[in-house]
Image (cartoon, rainbow, N blue to C red):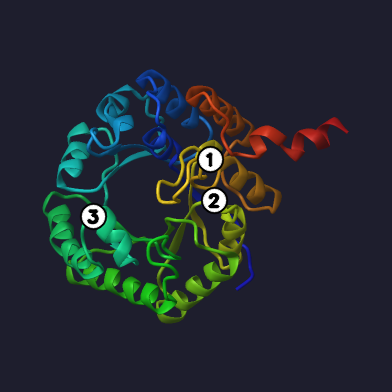
Amino acid sequence: MTDLPKEIHIVEEGPREGFQFEKGKIPTGRKIELIDALSATGLKHIQIVSFVDPRRVPGMVDAEDVVRGITPVKGVTYTGLWLNDKGFERALATQRLDVRGTITVGASDAFLKRNQNRTIEEQIASQYPMTRRYKELGVPVTRGGMMAAFGCNYEGDIPVDRVVSLVGEILAIARETDVTLDYVSLADTMAWATPLSVKRVIGAIRDKYPEVEISLHLHDTRGMGLANAYAGLEMGITRFDSAVAGLGGCPFAGHAGAAGNISTEDLVFMCEEMGISTGVDLDALIQCALLAEDIVGHPLPGSVMKGGTLARLRAAR
């Protein structure tokens, strides 16, 4: 498939990814400042915090304060991330977030053992009671997710047939718990993807499960992020996660300074130049990227925030 989509949907994850990853303390007010600025760019979905153990992730110690402090904009969805029951309960208790469940699996035993002390099979088994609990509490379950879908620093290449099989497991959990998923997200958690592997994996899933919509969560640790996004676009993918200015990093990369998610403004620039609508004001987003850099106090990897847009250069000629 080479027909490019007419528009894409972006989930902005910079506030959560970035402020979770930063080592220095960032004032709550400045986090809120960035979230409110992003809310005015045309982005429709912003993941703003994670509900995790503040002893392990001190950058999220003020998650509830951030949620209370933002000024919600009509038409913008605000979400949080959690990894366990306690985090889920904290997200619910805010009463200000769009709380939706995800059926989450992992494609690497080594990664799951390291991060959640589970095997692939144990992770799959855990999703049945979690999904039923979401339903009992009236929380919609609309998404499937797979970690390390393209490769793992601790295990190596992930076989394509394992990824396809795990998509089948996600669909089986959804079917057996009577929920309907909008899409399944494939995360390149440790930046092993290349344009060829993106196309191979998506193509294999489409061959087996043509009805499944796929989303991509791409890391740019090895500089392949936008190239992988372009490969996804060529395969008709319309959902992407990204982070303003490239906020954040990859804690699994094994070296300091590794890039995180693809930069939102770079993704928006590429798409808009290709005639793919994002619904985002790129100039306003660039200002957000510059604000993010000011907030963290060090250079961020986004490119368009430094180089500017072609629209301004064309207008100046």
Could one spot residue 296 in this view of the protein?
A: yes
Q: Position of residue 202 (x, y in %)?
A: 49, 71
Q: Residue at x 23, y 55 (%)?
A: 116
Residue indicated by mark 1: 246
Single out the residue that lies furthest toward the right: 317
Looking at the image, is mark 1 or mark 2 earlier in the sequence? 2
Q: Residue at x 49, y 39 (%)?
A: 43
The location of residue 173, given as percent across then percent down, is 22, 69
Q: Earlier in the sequence, mark 3 or mark 1?
A: 3
Residue at 50% across, 61% down = 192
As displayed, is residue 123 above or below residue 36? below
- Image quadrant holding the N terminus, namely bottom right
Q: Nearer the viewer, residue 183 or 105?
A: 105
**Mark 1, secondary structure of its residue:** helix
Query: Foreground mark, 3 or 1?
Result: 3
Name the amino acid, label 2. Answer: Asp
Observer able to see residue 308: no
Does 117 sit above or below residue 211? above
Label 2: state its secondary structure: loop
Pointers 2 and 3 in contact (C-beta within 8 Å): no
How far is disc 1 from disc 2 in space, using C-alphas? 9 Å
Q: Which residue is mark 3?
A: 116
Residue 202 falls left or right of residue 251: right
Q: Residue at x 62, y 58 (%)?
A: 227
Mark earlier in primary sequence (2, 3) = 3
Splitting the image into 4 quarters, where does residue 117 fall?
A: bottom left
Tell me the residue that label 2 is attached to.
Answer: 220
Circle 3 SS class: helix
Above or below — where is 24 with respect to 136? above
Q: Badge 2 local density, few (<14 within 10 Å), some, or many (20+)? A: many
With 35 as the anchor, is 41 left or right in this view? right
Q: Position of residue 256 (x, y in %)?
A: 48, 41
